[in-house]
Amino acid sequence: MVFDFDGTLAELHLDFQLMKKRLGSLAGVFLERPAHPYDGPALEWIEELGLELQARDPVSVPEFKSRCRLLVTAMEMDAAAKGRLFPFTLKVLEDLRGRGIKLGVITRNCTAAVRTVFPEIDRFVQVFLAREDANRIKPDPEHLLQAVRMLGVEPRETLMIGDHRIDIQTAKQAGTLSGGVCSGKLSAAELRAEDPDFLAQDVVALMEELFG
């Protein structure tokens, strides 16, 4: 099993809309005009804004991206300082290890933020791939497939569990099973629209559905 982190194993405190607002303000300074609206994730928006800036002032692109990364990481660390694992997380991971199930965590979050919330993560899972460790980050299936290879299993033998449509989309593209949990910010209806193989209120409920 491969888990997402924020909203799946831990409380989600990061305000992505605020993050995009701040990124837009920063981009406006470099572009010398308001940044275009963007409905997608913040990290992908940084790349799009970088392409816009490349056409206008290519020399400033490295500084722009560096400042964006610093902004994102600072917000992630602030959120991590307020974060905690869900009460059920350690017991679920221990129970799964007792069943002989190989475990991984993949996240678009940074390593330092995850380890702030879960400093002993390496004791509970065999593979942990934050965005710095991934060849490409989800929803690119390579993020999940990299974890699958490191676990020494096949995609068809793997269940990807997460609280966001990105997690379900990643699983489907990687050829694994998908499990949605409603412990983040998306509702059951929003997750059901992605047609996951399993859907439950949280990880505990999903384990009960799987193992009884």
Image: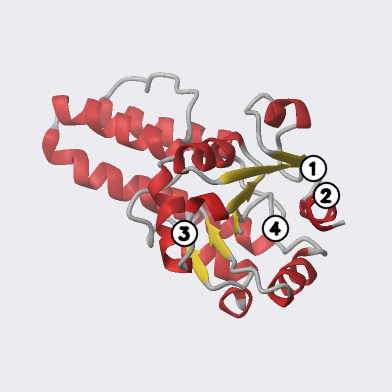
From the viewer's perspective, tell me whether residue 180 is left or right of residue 109.
right
From the viewer's perspective, tell me whether residue 73 is left or right of residue 56.
right
Which of 4/145 is in front? 145
- Which residue in the protein does label 4 denote? 10
- Which residue in the protein does label 1 denote? 200
Q: Give neighbour class at mark 1: few <14, some 14-19, many 20+ (Cα, 10 Å).
A: some
Distance CA(mark 3)–CA(mark 2) = 23 Å
Q: Secondary structure at mark 3?
A: helix
Proximity of marks 3 and 4: CB atoms separated by less than 8 Å:
no
Proximity of marks 2 and 1: CB atoms separated by less than 8 Å:
yes
Q: For the residues carrying marks 1 and 3, which lies nearer the camera in this image? A: 3
Q: Residue at x 38, y 48 (%)?
A: 142
Proximity of marks 1 and 4: CB atoms separated by less than 8 Å:
no
Q: Which mark is residue 148?
A: 3
Q: Give neighbour class at mark 3: few <14, some 14-19, many 20+ (Cα, 10 Å).
A: many
Q: Indicate the quadrant where residue 200 lies.
A: top right
Q: Give neighbour class at mark 2: few <14, some 14-19, many 20+ (Cα, 10 Å).
A: few
